[in-house]
Image (cartoon, coloured by chain):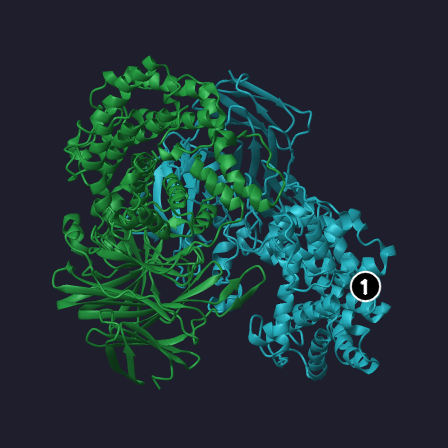
Chain colours: A green, B cyan
Amino acid sequence: MRTHLLIATAVFAVSSCIAPQTVSSPTSEATNSASNLYDKVLSETRARLDSAIGNPIDVPVPLDAGGGYTHEQHKRNAKAIYQAGLLYEATGERKYLDHAVRLLDSYVELYPTLGLHPKQKEQTPGRLFWQSLNEAWWLVYTIQGYEIIRDDLADDKRGEIESELIRPMAEFLSEGQPQTFDKVHNHGTWATAAVGMTGYVLGDQSYVEKALLGLDRSGTGGFLRQLDELFSPDGYYNEGPYYQRFALMPFVLFGQAIQANEPERGIFERRDGILEKAILSTIHQNYAGLFFPINDAIKDKGIATQELLYGVAVAYELSGDPALLSVVAEQGRVVPTEGGRQLATDLSAGKAEPFPYQSMRLRDGANGDQGALDVLRASDDPNGFTAVVKNTSQGLGHGHFDKMGLLVFDRGSEILRDYGAARFLNIEAKYGGHYLRENDAYAKQTIAHNALVVDRTSHFGGVTEEGNKHRPDIGDFVIGERISATSASIDKAYPAVTLTRTVALVNDPALEAPVLIDLVRGAGEGLHDFDLPWHYNGQLVETNYTIDADTIARAPLGDQAGYQYLWKVGEAELPNAQAQTTLLLDNRFYSLTSAVPEGTHVLLAELGANDPDFNLRREPALILRTPLSRSASFATVIEPHGEYNGIDEFTLASHSQIERVEHVEGDGMDVVQLHLKSGETVSVGLAGKSGSSEQHIMQTDSGAVSWTGPYEVIGSDQGE
Amino acid sequence: MRTHLLIATAVFAVSSCIAPQTVSSPTSEATNSASNLYDKVLSETRARLDSAIGNPIDVPVPLDAGGGYTHEQHKRNAKAIYQAGLLYEATGERKYLDHAVRLLDSYVELYPTLGLHPKQKEQTPGRLFWQSLNEAWWLVYTIQGYEIIRDDLADDKRGEIESELIRPMAEFLSEGQPQTFDKVHNHGTWATAAVGMTGYVLGDQSYVEKALLGLDRSGTGGFLRQLDELFSPDGYYNEGPYYQRFALMPFVLFGQAIQANEPERGIFERRDGILEKAILSTIHQNYAGLFFPINDAIKDKGIATQELLYGVAVAYELSGDPALLSVVAEQGRVVPTEGGRQLATDLSAGKAEPFPYQSMRLRDGANGDQGALDVLRASDDPNGFTAVVKNTSQGLGHGHFDKMGLLVFDRGSEILRDYGAARFLNIEAKYGGHYLRENDAYAKQTIAHNALVVDRTSHFGGVTEEGNKHRPDIGDFVIGERISATSASIDKAYPAVTLTRTVALVNDPALEAPVLIDLVRGAGEGLHDFDLPWHYNGQLVETNYTIDADTIARAPLGDQAGYQYLWKVGEAELPNAQAQTTLLLDNRFYSLTSAVPEGTHVLLAELGANDPDFNLRREPALILRTPLSRSASFATVIEPHGEYNGIDEFTLASHSQIERVEHVEGDGMDVVQLHLKSGETVSVGLAGKSGSSEQHIMQTDSGAVSWTGPYEVIGSDQGE
């Protein structure tokens, strides 16, 4: 074995040979469990491969589309080559090298016989796979395993594998598909990473240069350009965290290889350390271990995915930041590489420190000028009270139509939620595991989100190309002790209507715990219907309104733009222009108290109409509807409170502490007043587009309220 | 402090004084966490009381019904007296004694002024509380705290407390309410325990004797009689585990006091150790930490409730069984007594052994002849594949109308579930926390359960008094390697119709994992509609039938007997008399494959119709309906299979392995054949009322099947 230089496997210490049957010494529990994270992945990998070695090699002629048998088998084979390399290195056992060679031999026979895949997908067909993306993925895994065994192969064997399989595949992925290879898109990154990593292993600098600079080596395409454009300056990826996770992988692996082979390129310093930022921003975009489910996101994906296991290992190698060890503890597993070993060792040595989850603005766009994902966290607790405001750009084909959509989480659960994608990934019985028709027809539509809907149509008319052209105009983002807040507006989501949303996390001694203020406004020409939906989680326990429920018949809420999937289950008048709804979820109560326009009423809904295949989850929603108005403002306080303890049979503070919310609107500024049952009043001044020294003054029923800068909490004294 | 003899606090070692701020020594993690269970409860108790000591005493004039302010405050005060005693003993700090005395002084002033409670409940009013049950509960806690401080009080203080408060209350609970005190009912047990424990503390043997033998000391009433009659010989309590938990508490505490004061009575040996059996059977009636939710049960109640914390401490003192330490680990907390300390110490010393969860029949009725609760567990894993068949008696006023109802659990979740009680305990906004009208109207009805319904009416016409008269005739209960099974029948649930259910847990090498066979039959005179409901958990992913869904309008399934709460959401024909439904829950698939009578169709339903107050959870159900038949048999295989892994993106075995279920019915015997897609056939012979040596032979399409005894799995060979 030579010293190899694809970092994922590079500094693997042969001396630290792992015998899976070894019993850890009985020191502290923490030490055991942490070192076991590495032992565990090694012994699992070994068990899996040992069992595969006993079976015949299966390298089928490509036939199936994604998810089908030959597709999955070729994926398994690439992983097996990779893992065989790792295990050969870790154990020195020849059988692992032999297994990798047997697999490679079969591909040496197969690959030259292949034309394009019979089920080729659109404009980017592969040969082993229906799309070249999968082929690049295959080579990224295979080349890492091959590197480890390469020096121990006979010259003719090595020559054969490289000339019949690896070089042809690298050529196919580069010169063979310039439209993908040179594209600034994550599919392009997979191709450049595969070819560039192959270049390092084969010692072919021409592959490396094409990978870095594009086929013409001009820098208009290639990995460096991709690195410069696919992430925002804050490391945000414009499709959102679910796809960011997937896009991240080739960046991390090829980046590591560049660093190991050509450290003089300073790849990890590029764009002020954009690679590390991309990894860290992916971590920051999780709640309770799962990614914020904006856009097309399947909700069980989170920080424990393979991509982020690699990401954390690389970030740790770069920074040695002990906060990453807390992330590893949350992930509960490591990659079977030296990086993974190091993480497990340091975790067991008790070096972990809390990961600094915090409020942050992640700007969108290569230049950071395409909106932002705004995260408000009440604490560094990964399961703490958190709001996400989606002030980002559309997110291309996987984007959803919820400009300035809101998500709220607490105690490890969704409180106001996003449906995510309508898809059962890898479940054959559900449309082959593909995106369901309900994804376009419901999950992408505005009404499926906690975002303002005008006239029962989606933002941008539900047209992605239109959405791609626009993004919110973001206002001030401020983090403070008493208030952290964000604001944004857009006037292109609907013709001649402007939408504005300001969300603030407010801390005040008069409040039991931090609350969110959510101020949503729609205003334009002519009369419109404004719908503000809240997709809530939990049981409805108390309302200040009397619900006229649809108890013996139900009909859908509408017939298009996603409304057709929601049953109307009740409605209620709001005579005092105040809506208060209390929910119970697990052991906590949540009250939503809103000042709404006169004439607003409440619609209660449940998902599941027009769903003949039972594809949608049955989830409740509540919609504040203001009909036929020039404008509508909804000022809501979202308030976690009290405790329900079913085990010890007690309940505390099950009622909202808010008597009434008052909203006073001015020119570019607002005051929201929380009149508490205790008699105290908390006033919040909001002016999301003002300099930090700008002065604001507004009259309220209880007197003048003044503040400086964009957002401020004004104690109850001033208003009196 | 004298040596006191109410066991809960009896052998509390003063020398083991707990300073809450003490940092545990950094030995192993396991040791820390376990010893912390005791440290934790002590320091929590101390913190709570220290904070209360700073506030004025609050002993209000009784005014409110259950759940109201004065009710809850008197409960808090009794706990405070109890805890003050414990802390006085643990720390020796006088302030705790003083706090208890201050509270007692206030009651000394209040109690003599009280007549019956203004909101007296039915025939059993209290003085401090609306019902005497709560008053007995109050004295049980108070007398334990009082015992600890008693010897350190001045004679006149002691005399005052006893003559003005404790004796009057004990008299009120005994001579003052003979109808409750002498009743063989758990309310009677609370009264006898309170009075008997008071007798030991005051040294008044007349109290003890009345408590043990009834007011006339004849033994026709009193604690011993209650002990003889309220639990079955297997320790089952006829209202089910939710109420068993509550009923257990006074038995355990008074039992302990009797043992400490009059060991010669051999109270723990009585009825072959019935007290310990009652504690153990309560533990056995949990799944994943929560009690089987049969009858009126609130689902968040489980083994971590106070009552069972005491129960486990007492059981451990009796038996020292290290399996109980595993229960403590599941409970995650201990009581703040010597028993709790011992559990925590031994748990930290690593002495825990697995609790022997296993298949078992818990006979119902004082003589064990009133049916049984049958539990089938595939392993000793508390989260393993488990079925519960409710072959018990009615369970009195809290009983539900589901003779031979079925519950199925796997991987910590409900698969086929029971709604439990319709009640939000302690949630004022939900009808004051009382049982909701939907409890009688829906949750108790047969259709709310996985039990056979005839002609859309509930068992016994939904009349409790009628239900109380009858119980299933239980057949053989067998535990074996390849099959564990139970059978029961009843001919009194409906006029002239007999219901039979046989449930078998089957293990066979041809199967990926154990499956359940559920054979349900209804047969009688005349033509009837038979409905077999399954209240399933999870997402419907695949069916062998085409659903005609109610996509744009919904109506309730019926107008009475609970049907009015279920929306009809779809229906389907079953042309081949086979129904196969596959569900996905978390990471596992579940298929239900049934052989059904010709003409059977499927109804799909969702809960929530006629629910104007949003009181019911939205849960789906599937109903197999056989219309207008003399009889109907449903032979179902319930099969967990495969894996869905969303994190690593793979899916295994998402389809059922069963091609077809064949059911052949004979005279008192049945064969159910599982024809697998692999080509193999697993035959199961079921004859639930036959001796162990009885021979059975039946013809099937694939030949004769013969077996001996009630239940047997016959390999695929014989059938060919």
Q: Quadrant of residue B629?
A: top left
Rendered location of residue B403, percent (x, y): 57, 46
Depth check: B292 or A410 in front? A410
Identify whether B48 is placed above or below A454: below
Amino acid type of the residue that numbered disc 1 sits on in the rendered structure: Leu
Rendered location of residue A395, percent (x, y): 23, 49
Depth check: A387 or B476 in front? A387
Residue B206 showing in the rendered view = yes
Rendered location of residue A312, percent (x, y): 40, 44
Identify whether B675 is placed above or below A683: above
Residue drawn at (76%, 77%) of the image: B168
Residue B528 showing in the rendered view = no
Chain of the residue under label 1: B
Residue drawn at (60%, 74%) of the image: B51
Q: Which residue reaches farthest top?
A: A156
Label 1 element class? loop
* Tally of numbered discs: 1
What residue is pinned by disc 1? B5
Rendered location of residue B365, percent (x, y): 69, 49
Image-based side of A101 in relation to B298, left or right: left
Q: Quadrant of the N terminus of chain B?
A: bottom right
Q: Which residue reaches farthest front?
A: A264
